[in-house]
Image: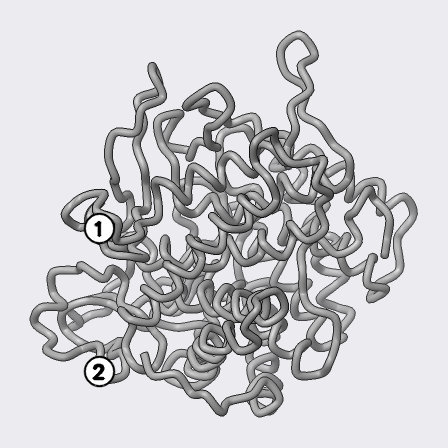
């Protein structure tokens, strides 16, 4: 991609104001017209949100979007609506033991509410802090209980595919373990064994860095630095790693760009969080320096791969090895074309990645010996965000319920709507894309206004508002 080195957050403020105006209309349209009894809205079909029952993993993005809209604009109606919906619809999810996405659903809702109280943006309702913190504790423990050991101490949180499966996506759901740990929670196991949620966070992050991310070190003949495998498979009998795989990408030996984006978003956010964790909390033999080093190595490798394998405007195609890309000529040296006849773009991957790129940049600027070490990453994220704040990615049609257009859910399964006369999916939105573009927009808006950074763990340390 081509990075705009001169773009600054304040330059985007007019575009962000326009963005939030369209965002409010999309939220209101969904609220007024979607039947929640159908299950969580997942993707649009001809502009209208529909469910796609795999799991109800997108409720948090629905109600979390209203909280972000309130925070960005001050419109209290979105806060009131979110509080009501979270209370009605999210309770059972707190102890859901069959999924790997608590960090998506619960941090986006209960976590955002707790953060807003901590930052003084909203007043606490009667008993609300205790209620929210109990929810975060339950969620973190439930997520950590999906544990597959691979050696004496290491292991990973298994995906919903089963105990043999590690997803790259789960790196961002570690926020649920982080939040619960910061509130002082411990998972109790057999014989009242006390299991540190932070230890499991570290072990999962280490396993993901070792097996999901490639570093160009000769692991296999497709080992390209920064490549990411969506799924890593293990022998659950002896803990041995078996092979890379992909559920939603083209293959285990290509890079599904949304999986890449989860890695880019997940590690920098965890690096920020580690700055709040005392050294005595770390697992034996895993020093803070060691943990930060492997997280930073994974984050930078994935970020560099994204920049090198994305078209000039910062919007990637759905998989860097998708076969139709061979028909598209020098596709990396021009803007992405969502209307081509060969392979779809996935703007939701960009919406997730840009926040990670900017966080990585700011982390390096703060903690690296070289003052400008992170500038390239921050500017890359800002450049791609600018693209998404404009047409054809920003949805300006009030008849379309989606906010961010040209997203892909599950290309191999054919779950994405293909409009009449088209060869590939385009023009549709997804709930995670809409949520994450809002989150990225809020992140940049707060920077531009000189406000406190948007961080999920604000005010969670031992349950004390800072």
How many numbered marks appear? 2
> Residue at coordinates 67% horizontally, 55% vertically from top-left?
456
Q: Position of residue 54 (x, y in %)?
A: 39, 41
Closer-to-camera residue (104/434): 104
Element class at badge 2: helix
Q: Which of the marked residues, 2 or 1, is nearer the chain's N terminus?
A: 1
> Residue at coordinates 55% horizontally, 67% vertically from top-left?
364
Farthest-out residue, top: 191
Q: Which residue is mark 2?
A: 333
Q: Position of residue 398 (x, y in %)?
A: 49, 79
> Residue at coordinates 49% horizontally, 92% vertically from top-left?
6
Which quarter of the picture shows residue 158? top left
Element class at badge 1: loop
In this view of the protein, can residue 397 be seen by the observer? no
Q: Nearer the viewer, mark 2 or mark 1?
A: 1
Q: Which residue is mark 1?
A: 223
Instruction: Count neighbours of disc 2 (C-alpha within 10 A) and say few if under 14, some if 14 to 19, many if 20 or more.
Output: some
Which quarter of the picture shows residue 365? bottom right
- Measure the C-alpha gap from mark 2 to mark 1: 23 Å
């Amino acid at each position: 991609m081509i990075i705009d080195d001169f773009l600054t957050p304040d330059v985007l403020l007019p575009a962000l104001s326009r963005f939030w105006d369209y965002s409010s209309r999309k939220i209101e349209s969904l609220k007024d017209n979607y039947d929640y009894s159908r299950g969580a809205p997942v993707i649009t079909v001809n502009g209208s949100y529909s469910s796609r029952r795999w799991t109800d993993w997108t409720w948090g993005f629905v109600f979390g979007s209203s909280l972000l809209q309130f925070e960005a604009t001050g419109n209290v109606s979105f806060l009131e609506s979110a509080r009501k919906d979270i209370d009605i619809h999210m309770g059972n999810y707190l102890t859901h033991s069959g999924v790997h996405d608590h960090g998506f659903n619960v941090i986006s809702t209960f976590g955002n509410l707790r953060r807003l109280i901590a930052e003084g943006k909203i007043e606490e309702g009667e008993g609300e802090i205790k209620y929210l913190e109990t929810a975060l504790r339950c969620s973190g423990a439930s997520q950590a209980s999906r544990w597959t050991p691979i050696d004496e101490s290491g292991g990973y949180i298994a995906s919903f595919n089963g105990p043999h499966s590690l997803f790259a996506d789960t790196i961002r759901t570690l926020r649920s373990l982080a939040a619960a740990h910061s509130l002082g929670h411990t998972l109790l196991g057999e014989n009242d064994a006390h299991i540190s949620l932070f230890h499991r966070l570290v072990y999962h992050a280490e396993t993901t860095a070792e097996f999901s991310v490639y570093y160009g070190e000769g692991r296999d003949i497709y080992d390209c630095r920064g490549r990411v495998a969506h799924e890593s498979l293990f022998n659950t009998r002896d803990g041995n790693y078996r092979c890379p795989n992909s559920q939603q990408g083209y293959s285990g030996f290509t890079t599904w760009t949304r999986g890449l984006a989860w890695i880019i978003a997940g590690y920098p956010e965890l690096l920020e969080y580690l700055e709040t964790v005392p050294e005595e909390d770390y697992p034996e033999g895993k020093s803070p320096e060691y943990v930060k080093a492997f997280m930073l190595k994974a984050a930078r490798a994935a970020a560099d791969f994204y920049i090198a394998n994305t078209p000039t405007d910062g919007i990637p195609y759905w998989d860097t090895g998708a076969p139709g890309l061979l028909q598209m000529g020098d596709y990396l040296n021009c803007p992405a074309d969502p209307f081509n006849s060969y392979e779809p773009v996935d703007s939701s991957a960009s919406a997730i990645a840009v926040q990670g790129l900017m966080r990585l940049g700011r982390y390096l600027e703060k903690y690296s010996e070289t003052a400008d070490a992170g500038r390239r990453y921050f500017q890359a994220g800002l450049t791609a965000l600018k693209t998404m704040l404009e047409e054809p990615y920003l949805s300006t049609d009030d008849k379309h319920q989606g906010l961010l257009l040209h997203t892909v859910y599950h290309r191999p399964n054919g779950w994405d709507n293909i409009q009449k006369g088209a060869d590939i999916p385009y023009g549709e939105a997804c709930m995670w894309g809409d949520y994450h573009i809002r989150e990225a927009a809020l992140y940049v808006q707060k920077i531009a206004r000189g406000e406190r950074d948007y961080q999920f763990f604000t005010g969670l340390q031992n349950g004390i508002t800072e």
